[in-house]
Amino acid sequence: MRLSRTAPLPVRGIPLVLFAVSLSGITVATYLDRIIPIPWETAFVLLLILSQGSAVEVRGDNIVLIYGFGILKQRLPLDSINELSLLSRLEYGTILRHFKAYALTWLAIVLWLLFDFLALKAAGNPIRLYMDLFIIMTSLLFFLSLSVSRKHREILKWVVIASSIFMFTYPYQEWGLRALFPAFIFVLLATLIVRAFQNSDFILLIVRGNSYLLSSEKPEEGLKRIQEAIRHA
Amino acid sequence: MLKLPEGMERVWLMKAKGMREVEIAEALGVSRQAVNKALKDARVKLFEAFFGLSEVFSWEIIRVNAEKGFMVARGKCGDRNTRVYAFYLPGKGVKAFFGEEFPEYILKHAVEVGIADEKSAEKLVKALES
């Protein structure tokens, strides 16, 4: 039985390793290309796709988390579940608390790209320099979404406003009026991505002391299916 | 009201207080497999108890922890929606509370099983909600 509109996030095990390697790989692909000229970006994008969760199924006495269109699977025995919660609806619940490595991957991307932007000047490539700004902003907002609880969500609004102002003023100062249109598109895109992420609900499963995270557009239904499965295990 | 069988409850409580399965087995003079089986059964029974309770009162489940024996839900109290916190108390079964005020014995129980560090309602709510 498949849980509708529910997918696992790459927060532990092989999916997490693939996610962290591919995401950081994409940001250093330009430099790797200078050492060994192979299509690094394509390779890292494929790895990123492989790390993404595609479905959650209840099969017999297990919950099966499926990643990369069925290539990777994690089986969680139903009778070993210690906790089941709607993490996004807990007043002080944050993803960072349970999934430090996943959240810190986003922070590492921000720090590396800041270094690339400020010190290395994106290897002299103006398009990449601009892309750096966009990815820094998006990754920072993602990191904050993972570390701010429902109770303190107001902070995020102010960070979005502050970073949007920066996304307009910095390119305008550097490159003039022609930079404003792409800046507008980037701000819109970053806000939409983060908003979509924030609007998703997250189901937390703790099995034998290990935590797993599912993103769900129908969390109540997902929770009910898991409840039924535990009852019949 | 659901109560775990005495032996199963003893094993569950020892685990909830932080003992390892091997230590429980040694203390009770049983095999580690028997402890593991008792814990699995206890978890399923506790999930069943909390799910059943939320179904009867039409509460919306937010968190169920079978290891420490508690549930966070959203339910109606009169006309308004409010938080419901339920706990499994050894020998007594499940007790539920609306809002953020708890009697002394719940605060004591929460410290005993390691849900909260201190006997404070504020600390307990923070632990349940994070």
Image (cartoon, coloured by chain):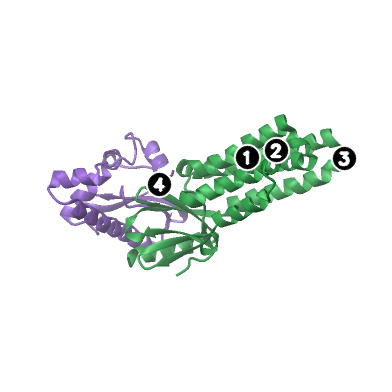
Q: In the image, are marks 1 and 4 on the same chain?
A: no
Disc nearest the viewer among 3 and 2: 3
Three-letter code, disc 1: Leu
Q: Is residue A192 left or right of residue A150?
A: right
SS for callout 1: helix
Name the residue tied to disc 2.
A163
Quarter of the image for the C terminus of chain A: give it.
bottom left
Amino acid on which the number 3 mark rests in the picture = Leu
Q: Colour of chain B?
A: purple
Distance Cα–Cα, label 4 vs label 3:
55 Å
Q: Residue furthest right?
A: A177
Judged by depth in the image, the label closer to the viewer, 2 or 1, is 1
Residue A140's disc is: 1
For marks 2 and 4, give the CA distance: 38 Å
Q: Which mark is residue A177?
A: 3
Q: Position of residue B8 (x, y in %)?
A: 19, 54
| Crowd around label 2: few <14 · some 14–19 · many ≥20 (10 Å) | some
Q: Are marks 4 and 3 on the same chain?
A: no
> What residue did someone put label 4 on?
B99
Q: Earlier in the sequence, mark 3 or mark 2?
A: 2
Residue A41 on image: x %, y %: 67, 49
Mark 1, mark 4: which one is toward the viewer?
1
